[in-house]
Image (tube, rainbow, N blue to C red):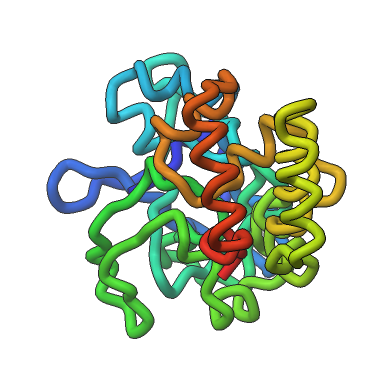
Amino acid sequence: MAYLCHLLTPRAEARLLDGNQLGIFAISPISVGTVIAVCGSMIHSSDVLDHMPQEHMRTALQIEDNLFVQTIADSVDACFVNHSCHPNSGFLNAVQIVAMQDIPAGQKITYDDAMTNGTSRRRFVCDCNSIDCRGEITGDDWRQKNLQERYRGYFSPYLSRRIAASGLARKLKKKDVEKLLLDYDKNPISSITNVLQVVLGKPFCQWPDLIAALPIDADRQRLLLIKDSRHLDHLVQELNELRGANFLPK
C-alpha cells in the first residue's frame, strides 16, 4: 500500500521494487523534521471514491472523516511512499510527510497507514516483515494505544482529533436516552446529533461528520447521511438499547 506524492524532496528518489512496484529511497542523508513529500492534488468525498476504480482508493490519502486527497498517476511524475509497521516517517499535517528520525542514504522511506487511515473502506495484508508487523492493516489501527503513543505528533490532524475525542466520549446515561426518545419524533436529526456528540466525544461536530465517524459500514453511513427514516429509527433503537457502547472509541 502506498500514497502517490505530488512533490518529493531532491534528497530522495523513486526506485523499482520487486513485482514492478515503486518505492521512495533517500539518496542523501535526511535529517529528522525534514519534509520529504507532499501528497495529492485533488480532493474527493468517500462517496465519489466508491464509484472510482479500486486503485484510486488504494492510493488515496484520507485527510478527514469523509475526505480523501489524491494525485492521479498519469497527471504528474508520481512516486510512491510505502507503508511499514516500523516507519521512519510520519505526517507533519494532512498532506506533508516528514522524517521522524535521521534517515541515512539508501534507506527506504516509509510511513504507517495507521497515521492516516480511519475508514473501513481501506484494509490490506501487510508484508513489510518488520519486527512490529501487524499482518493485516485496517482503518481501526489508529485506536491501538501503543500506536497512539509511538506516533504521537505524527498522526494526520483529523485522527489526532479523534484520539483526543476518545477521552471525552462516554456511554449515554438514562437521562440522555430519555431525552432522545422524548425529542426524536419532534426533531429526529437534532436529537440524534446531541447524543452522538456525547458518545463519540465530538461536542462541536454536526450530522455529516458524526455519521462519518461511526464505526459502521459505508452503505449504512450513506443511508444515514440522506436521513433514511428506517435507518434513523434503527439507530435510535440501538442507542436506546446499548446506550452507545458499540460506538465508543476503542
Left or right of residue 103: residue 15: left
Of 149 and 110, which appears nearest the observer? 149
Q: How many marks?
A: 0
Q: In which quarter of the view is residue 65 placed?
A: top right
**Residue in the image at 56% along x and 70% along y:** 250
Tell me which residue sits at (54%, 23%) in the image: 229
Residue appearing at x 49%, y 39% in the figure? 234
Occupied quadrant, residue 166: bottom right
Look at the picture and state if 237 lies above or below 53. below
Q: Could you say where residue 71 lies in the image, as x and y percent from the top left?
A: 49, 25
Which residue of the protein is positioned furthest toward the right in this rendering? 204
149, above or below 162, in the image: below
Q: Position of residue 181 (x, y in %)?
A: 71, 44
Please tell me which residue lies in front, 162 or 109.
162
Q: Nearer the viewer, residue 111 or 51?
A: 51
Question: Residue at 55% of width from left, 68% of height from top?
Answer: 143
Whole-percent x, y for residue 171 in the image = 68, 67
Q: Position of residue 247 (x, y in %)?
A: 56, 58
Front-lying residue, 116 or 38: 116
Query: Is 86 positioned to the left or the right of 224 in the image?
Result: left
Whether residue 42 appears in this view of the structure is: no
- Can residue 150 be seen? yes
Quadrant of residue 240 within the rendered picture: bottom right
